[in-house]
Amino acid sequence: MFNPTQADGSIHEDQVLNFLVNTIDEEVELDLALNAKTTSEDVHEVLVGTCADGTSVSTLCEKSEDSPHHNTVLYHLREKFDLESVERIGNTLLQKDVLDVLPEQVEVCADLHLRPYYGDEDETDGLYHSEAKRGTTAFHAYATLYARVTNKRFTLTVRRLEDGDTASCVLAEFLGVLDGLDFSVKAVYLDREFYDSKCLTLLQAPNYAYVMPIVRWGKTIKQELSEGWSRVIQHDLTGKLDGPAVTVEFPVYIDCAYQNGRYNEHGVARHGYAADAPFIDTPRDARYHYAKRFGIEASYRLSEQSIATTSTQDPVVRLLYVVVSLLLQNVWRYLHWEYVATPRRGGRRLWSWPFKEFINMIRRAAWTSLAVRRAVPTNRPPDDRFHR
């Protein structure tokens, strides 16, 4: 009988923190003064610890004895970076180590993530405006590209969005990133924001397999999605591609299913998907494969658990926090696969190591390293109720 390889070591929480700080320090140069008391590792340690703690740089530094002053850390974050360098360095960090564990062929997902802005309406310059959502029309918006491998999601690139950025511009950049990576793309799964003639043309030019939900634009498609049963139709969209109007034609898979009271709804639900992939033959195939994209939402929920809080409107600092938050997820999946999983016949055994536990390990390690306050002064000694 084959016995899985037993663990011959362990990774302590301070080693996990060191791995993250070293990863960032290898790619980020802060150009500190020769006589500076603060090192780049100190700044990066506070940055990682702040994201893991889900607090602000000021809060973490103020309650730590061995951390740099919060003004020092914030100065370096604000003055030593710009948007272009953060995006470039961020993509390098996100792809580091991850590319070594990806197979030769992967599925990729692209999505737009909107973080609501509730500040002064007169201070929304540089933000991304969209339809009203969660009580606002102004957002800190980011576009992300993920590689999906057997239910594991690795972020490959992230970029900030502002007014004037279009879905086709984002997609063109993402396809350029994919062209420069050493793996083939099985399929591209896109959100409905990418449903337009320009994006479809971009996908068809290099013949990418793709799946995305359609938007009910026009009487024809509205009529198709209001009657009949599951079927495949040909549809077209017309748009301008830096010149005269161009029409792009593509198949639409309409999947129909009885709702049977789900979400208190009854009757037939019809879902339309623009899809062109060799592994999609039926409308049910299109719906099944597009459901793989929903894992992106889980990544966003994890990101909310591991991102620094801030009131600043500085887009550079906010993007930097997003990059580190996504980096934490990539490192967790990488370490889980490469170091924690047990090699065995038929595939590795992934021992339980939840993301929350991973974040808690980093938080405790940062508290220890920075000497976070563990006691508070009192005006009288504790009585017997404080002992056991």
Image: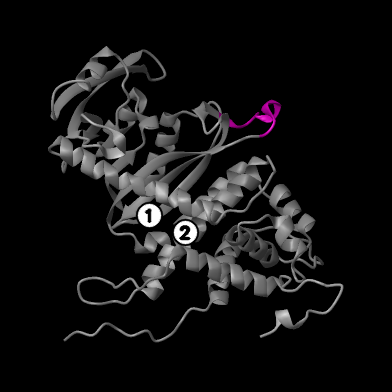
The residue wearing badge 2 is 329
Q: Position of residue 199 (x, y in %)?
A: 35, 29
Q: Position of residue 331 (x, y in %)?
A: 47, 63
Which residue is most to the right?
379
Q: In the picture, residue 115 is in which quadrant? A: top right
| Residue ID at (21%, 38%) | 286
The type of residue carrying mark 2 is Gln
Instruction: Determine crowd level at label 2: few under 14, some 14-19, many 20+ residues with C-alpha closer than 10 A.
Output: many
| Residue ID at (30%, 35%) | 264
The first of marks 1 and 2 along the sequence is 1
Q: Which residues are magenta?
A: 119-128
| Residue ID at (78%, 81%) | 383
Q: Quadrant of the C terminus?
A: bottom right
- Front in this rendered view, residue 361 or 187: 361
Q: Position of residue 33 (x, y in %)?
A: 78, 61
In this rendering, the answer to whether 53 lies above or below 18 is above
Give the SS element for disc 1: strand
Query: Are the residues tagged 1 and 2 within 8 Å (C-beta)?
Result: yes
Q: In the picture, residue 150 is in which quadrant? A: bottom left
In this rendering, the answer to whether 60 lies above or below 255 is below
Q: Position of residue 77 (x, y in %)?
A: 69, 52
- Front in this rendered view, residue 162 or 32: 162
The type of residue carrying mark 1 is Arg
Instruction: Report whether 376 appears left or right of 104.
Output: right
User: In the rendering, which numbered label is found on residue 143?
Assistant: none
